[in-house]
Image (tube, rainbow, N blue to C red):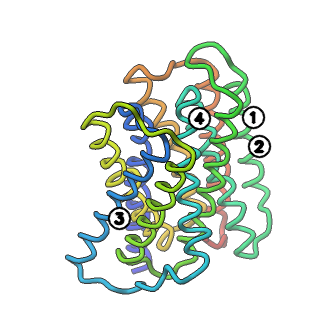
Amino acid sequence: MASTRTSAGLLAGLLTITLWASLPVLRNLISLPPMLTAAVAMGAAALMARCVGQRGGSSAGAKSYRDWTFWLMGVGGLTGALYFYFAALGKGDPAKITLVTYLWPLGFMLVADLLAGRGFQARTLLGAAVAFSGLIPLVLSNGQGEPTSVLGYAQGVASGISWIMFSLYLQGRTTMSWVDYKHLFAGAAIASWGLHSLFEAAPSQTTAMDWGVAALIGVGPYGLAFVTWGYALLRSSSTLLGVLTYFVPIISSLFLILVGRAAFSMPLIIAFVGVLGSAAITQMKSQRPGAASA
């Protein structure tokens, strides 16, 4: 039974990274401001969760919004991840931004180890060093691809920190019903709309494609993917899931290269090798005889 649950968790994790990897390409198809895109996406995700929840008849966890962690780590983490990532994608090469953003699994594994009482694991720290070393040439390169500003990289890192908060919130929940996700997505939609109203100018011209793709992002990469990610976190090793997420920037970058939005360059190859090397090193930790899984 435990093996079946773990396998189901890994399958959910694989579906999650596939959906996440499609996000930069989808974002490139529309011209809405970052927070307006997030508001539309989260509104669509909340509607999806409401429809599915009604069909399933689930009402468990309906009071989750009364918990302060729901607002700080759940809604706050999700909104921050959306805002900073969407904002960063508009400030440079999306392949570079995505690679920097998806250093967050390293932070997630480090924090998960600390919370589980294991302290800082040497292999996790070594994996982090390898990944950062691989990314240095990419961050410093100014050759092929779009120029990327320091602010773009900083926003990518901020998005990653927000992802860690959101993932810790999901991991700390014993169960997550569709009602929980409906409240979570609706809260993020409201927060994103408020930020859009305060800090962004309304778009002068929009198309049906802008709104449709933004809603599609909410149903897929930032809707269903969050549900499958929460499912995976409850049923599989956080270390192994952290390794799987390293493949998001690689798959995403390949998608971007295929559609002509990113250039295939030597710094990008070095970054790929660094991320994969980090994944291999940190995964070795969970395969030691007698090692406890998170």
Q: What is the C-alpha distance between the residues marked 4 and 2?
A: 19 Å
Q: Which residue is mark 2?
A: 129
Which mark is in front, 4 or 3?
A: 3
Q: Residue at x 40, y 63 (%)?
A: 228
Image side of residue 35 versus residue 72, left or right: left
Q: Are marks 2 and 1 in contact (CB under 8 Å)?
A: yes
Q: Specify the amino acid type for callout 1.
A: Ser
180 and 207: which one is in front?
Answer: 207
Q: Residue at x 65, y 59 (%)?
A: 108
| Mark 3 surroundings within 10 Å by alpha-carbon count, few (fewer than 14), some (14 through 19), many (20 or more) | many
Give residue 259's position: percent from left, percent from top: 37, 23
Give residue 111's position: percent from left, percent from top: 71, 64
Helix, strand or loop for disc 1: helix
Q: Which residue is mark 4?
A: 97
Q: Earlier in the sequence, mark 1 or mark 4?
A: 4
Q: Specify the amino acid type for callout 3.
A: Ala
Helix, strand or loop for disc 4: helix
Q: Earlier in the sequence, mark 4 or mark 2?
A: 4
Q: Examine the image and state in which quarter residue 25 appears.
A: top left
Q: Which residue is mark 3?
A: 46
Q: What is the C-alpha distance between the residues marked 2 and 1?
A: 6 Å
Q: Specify the amino acid type for callout 2.
A: Ala
Helix, strand or loop for disc 2: helix
